[in-house]
């Protein structure tokens, strides 16, 4: 049985963090727990429970081995309550990832009492976002496929064991987003690649059955992507989002490292520099900042910090 991409990712990060000193681990656990609200959800920078931030908090606790007990029960209750309301698509994706994580990590299934046909309904919903280029748009109004939305859609299909419709067309779409600079773009009109869409493209190709980096085409693609990603790493050790942005950020650092790891192209020089950058944004009271210009700790960037750290210390 093939382990879903997201599950492999969580396991990879958790394994990397196994050797983390208990004091360092505990401060991040306590920060994440402190962000849980009375209704069981987790808050972001604006306050109040939010499905998006709840997903990041649960993933952070999971990779630290601390997603259990009352924390998990309360989070499951929050998800069940949100299922009774209208949930926008992007939040629905976060809800589903959270529910699956709770089930696989703790055995609690927040979706147990839901309509048994919901995976079929979900597939129908995503089918309406499919575009003629083979990708998935972010909204019903979107005219072209989005690399990131396609990545999320592929993960949802894989995670919930729904057959991926026309995977060859999806693979062709992703490859069409590749540019001469070696990276990938978010939408087809773009010429300049970005670190984050490049990571999303590589993640998608990991799931597509026909993808291989063992043939000549795959080897050439791997080399060009690795070269692009290495060029996105700055002297600080962090990765920038694209060549127009002069500063690194933690999201781009994590996704760049993740993609290089997926391609088996992480180099010691890259990880050594990245450790310094990741450490510079780690806060003594727990949690991470988004970048050197940031002054607010939140659960999303705390997960990115943990994930980046788990990738470089393996």
Image: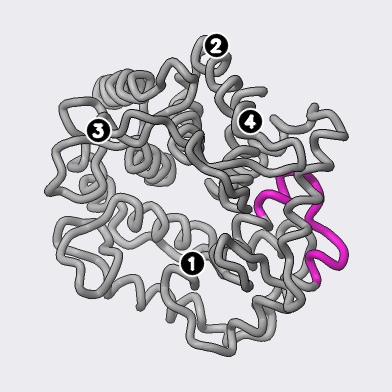
Choose mark 1 or mark 4, whichever is in front. 4
In contact (CB < 8 Å): disc 1 and disc 4: no
In contact (CB < 8 Å): disc 3 and disc 1: no
Residue position for label 3? 244
Lower sequence index among marks 3 and 2:
3
Look at the picture and state if 59 lies above or below 206.
below
Closer to the chain start, of discs 4 and 2, is 2
Q: Position of residue 63 (x, y in %)?
A: 71, 44
Check if residue 220 falls in the magenta segment: no
Q: Which residue is mark 4?
A: 309
Query: Dot 1: within a 10 Å radius of its alpha carbon, few (fewer than 14), some, or many (20 or more) residues?
Result: many
Residue underneath mark 2: 268
N-term mark: 3 or 1:
1
Give the secondary structure at mark 2: helix
Which portion, as a residue range, is magenta? 59-73
- Rendered location of residue 259, percent (x, y): 44, 32
| Disc sitting over residue 200 in the figure | none
How far apart marks 3 and 4 lie (CA) works out to: 26 Å
């Amino acid at each position: 049985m093939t382990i879903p991409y997201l599950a492999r990712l969580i396991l990879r990060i958790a394994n990397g963090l196994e050797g983390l000193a208990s004091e360092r681990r505990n401060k991040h656990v306590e920060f994440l727990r402190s962000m849980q609200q009375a209704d069981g959800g987790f808050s972001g920078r604006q306050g109040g429970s939010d499905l998006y931030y709840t997903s990041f908090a649960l993933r952070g606790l999971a990779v630290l081995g601390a997603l259990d007990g009352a924390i998990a029960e309360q989070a499951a209750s929050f998800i069940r309550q949100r299922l009774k309301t209208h949930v926008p698509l992007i939040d629905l994706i976060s809800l589903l990832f959270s529910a699956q994580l709770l089930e696989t990590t703790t055995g609690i299934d927040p979706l147990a009492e839901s309509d048994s046909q919901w995976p079929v309904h979900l597939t129908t919903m995503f089918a309406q976002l499919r575009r003629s280029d083979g990708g998935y748009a972010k909204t019903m109004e979107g005219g072209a496929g989005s690399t990131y939305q396609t990545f999320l859609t592929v993960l949802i299909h894989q995670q919930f064991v729904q057959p991926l419709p026309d995977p060859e067309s999806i693979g062709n779409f992703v490859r069409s987003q590749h540019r001469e600079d070696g990276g990938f773009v978010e939408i087809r009109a773009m010429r300049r690649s970005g670190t984050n869409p490049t990571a999303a493209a590589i993640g998608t190709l990991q799931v597509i059955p026909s993808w291989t980096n063992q043939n000549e085409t795959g080897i050439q693609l791997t080399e060009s992507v690795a070269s692009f990603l290495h060029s996105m790493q700055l002297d600080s050790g962090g990765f920038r989002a694209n060549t127009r942005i002069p500063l690194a950020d933690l999201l781009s650092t994590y996704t760049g490292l993740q993609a290089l790891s997926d391609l088996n192209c992480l180099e010691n020089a890259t990880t050594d520099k990245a450790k310094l950058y990741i450490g510079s944004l780690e806060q003594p009271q727990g949690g991470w900042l988004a970048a050197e210009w940031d002054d607010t700790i939140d659960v999303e960037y705390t997960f990115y910090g943990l994930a980046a750290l788990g990738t470089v210390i393996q």
